[in-house]
Amino acid sequence: MNGFTISVPASSANIGPGFDSLGLSLGLYLTLSVEKHSHWEIQHQSLLLPDFESYDKHFIYQIAKETAHHYGKQLPPCKVTIDSSIPLARGLGSSASAVIAGIELANQLCRLQLSLLDKLMLATEKEGHPDNVAASLVGGLVVTASTANDKINYYKWNSLNIDIITVIPDTELKTEASRSVLPEHFTRKYAASASSICNLFIVALTSHDYHLAGEMMENDLFHEPFRATLIPKYTEIKKAARSLGNYGTVISGAGPTMLVFAPKGKGQSIAGELQGQFSSYNICQVNIDTQGMKVTSGKEEVAEN
């Protein structure tokens, strides 16, 4: 086995009204450096990664092992060195990136030759919904839908002429807690209104009408009204971002991170302005990743997605 590296980007889901169906790939990364070894060994190189007791208790190893067993294979021993710039429990898809990494680790070690759809189906089964995993897998802005026969369809855009700013508080918010405040049912009229907002948002965003897209993303009815009280300084951040000329600000995934859509070329300066107003936050412009998960051997790319 030759050494290789797996790189998986972070993701933001929902983006306002695109609840459980819309994901955006962001330029923060989970990276696995893998090399042949006499026994299994996993090392962490980032304080953003969670503690673990032993390699066989590690989440990424468990995903890889389950994937290998699904195809009747066993993982060969190796040393995996893991680095990450994705904060945990902040609504930036840290769990989804780990799932994708584990599936690809098994794919490479066991020579499974999984297709893109194979990986997406496996990852969705683990995560429960495809929005984050699809964005991390293929990159860009991805709209997903699961049909009655459990097939997952998606469409990807790369051409968003905007800057993205992440507003990350120094507090965690577990997805389970964030989901617990959501209603189990909506009336038909309410659901129709929420869906119409999402429909117009997608059309505006992909047509580069960012002012209209911003208006629609800030009028979500599916999740933001119920999660707003869980997000530190939710109203203040949205008001401050709007005053600086941004298109719109939404909860990233389940939160507590907020995602700001800014005019192209102004993201860095606006992030600096917001940082001055919210000094306890980590606020910065991040790139939109358009490649998604990739695997490299040395300097040569050996697989993509």
Image (tube, rainbow, N blue to C red):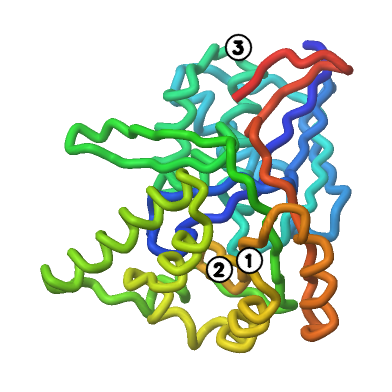
> Between disc 1 and disc 2, whose residue precedes?
2
- Residue type pointed to by label 1: Val
Cβ–Cβ under 8 Å for marks 1 and 2: yes
Vertical comparison of 32 with 235: above or below: above
Q: Nearer the viewer, residue 84 or 165?
A: 165
Give the residue number, with chain letter if any, for mark 1. Answer: 260
Q: Nearer the viewer, residue 72 or 110?
A: 110
Q: Which is in the foreground here, disc 3 or disc 1?
A: 1
Earlier in the chain: of badge 3 and badge 1, it is 3
Q: Which residue is mark 2?
A: 248
Name the residue rendered at 60%, 11% in the picture: 111
Distance between the alpha carbons at the discs numbered 1 and 2: 6 Å
Instruction: Name the side, left or right, on which 50 lies relative to 14.
Output: right
User: Is 293 above or below relative to 161?
Assistant: above
| Residue type marked 3 | Arg
The mark found on residue 111 in the picture is 3
Neighbourhood count class around disc 3 (C-alpha, 10 Å): few under 14, some 14–19, many 20 upward: few
